[in-house]
Image (tube, rainbow, N blue to C red):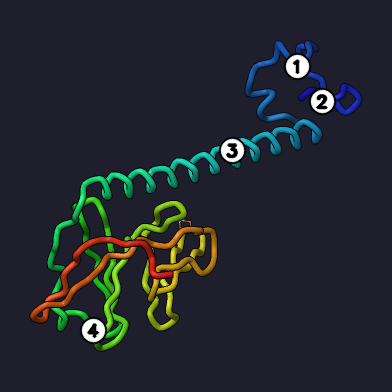
Amino acid sequence: MRIPDGERISVPPDGRGDAPQPRWRRDFPIDWPQDEYVSRRDFTRFMVLTSLAFTVGQFWILLQNAWRRSQGALPIVAIDNVDAIPVGGNKVFTYPTEKDPCILVRLDETHFVAFDRLCTHLLCPVIPQPEEGHLHCPCHEGYFDIATGRPLAGPPQRPLERVTLEIRDGTIYATGKSESLA
Ligand code: FES
């Protein structure tokens, strides 16, 4: 964008126009109209990069899910003993691979739930807040229902993937993954 000459207050010391000036002089202008233009340009650049990061993140999650499904049945893995997790307590674990962080939460005496731990917005780890009934993502104030993984508020649009559980002989096992119940 060209700033109309009428809005130019200062003149470069060498008296030449915009084009031959060094880059730093254009990036750090003295005059208000130019300064506003640089701010708008930087803001636009920031918005484009943020949107791009968001889109790449979403595609990455979809690809991972598709890859997992193509691998067939997931392993059955012991997470912990029932007695090791108090009501309202939680445990971070990985499933089905060491690179997939998940979180197990004990809702009451008999109910446990487990989900992917990474927020479906931009992959920050979620924090369980069982007293409030949700999982909280502190990065952009996202909230998920703690019983279903459904997004409740903030930027996340997709539910957390659920880890299916089974309790046998006092041990909690992860047995697979499924879409949220919502
Ligand atoms: S990463 Fe943005 S709300 Fe979770």
Residue 122 in the image, given as x and y percentages of width and height: 44, 51
Foreground disc of the pair 2, 3: 3
Task: Check if mark 2's residue and mark 3's residue have beta carbons within 8 Å.
Answer: no
Q: Quadrant of residue 180?
A: bottom left
In this picture, residue 164 sits left or right of residue 13: left
Q: Secondary structure at mark 1?
A: loop
Task: Check if mark 2's residue and mark 1's residue have beta carbons within 8 Å.
Answer: yes
Graded by Cα atoms within 10 Å as few (under 14), some (14 to 19) or many (20 or more), the crowding at tag 2 reads few
For marks 3 and 1, the one nearer the N-term is 1
Task: Check if mark 2's residue and mark 4's residue have beta carbons within 8 Å.
Answer: no
Question: How far is disc 2 from disc 3 in space, using C-alphas?
Answer: 23 Å
For marks 2 and 4, the one nearer the N-term is 2
For marks 2 and 3, the one nearer the N-term is 2
Task: Check if mark 3's residue and mark 1's residue have beta carbons within 8 Å.
Answer: no
Q: Which residue is mark 4?
A: 86
Extreme left residue here?
Answer: 169
Q: For the residue with label 4, is its CB less than 8 Å from the closest atom of ligand 1? A: no
Question: How far is disc 2 from disc 1 in space, using C-alphas?
Answer: 10 Å
| Amino acid type of the residue that numbered disc 4 sits on in the rendered structure | Pro
For marks 2 and 1, the one nearer the N-term is 2
Q: Which residue is mark 3?
A: 48
Q: Which residue is mark 2?
A: 3
Residue 13 in the image, given as x and y percentages of width and height: 76, 16
Question: How far is disc 4 from disc 3 in space, using C-alphas?
Answer: 45 Å
For marks 4 and 3, the one nearer the N-term is 3
| Amino acid type of the residue that numbered disc 3 sits on in the rendered structure | Val
Q: Residue at x 36, y 60 (%)?
A: 125
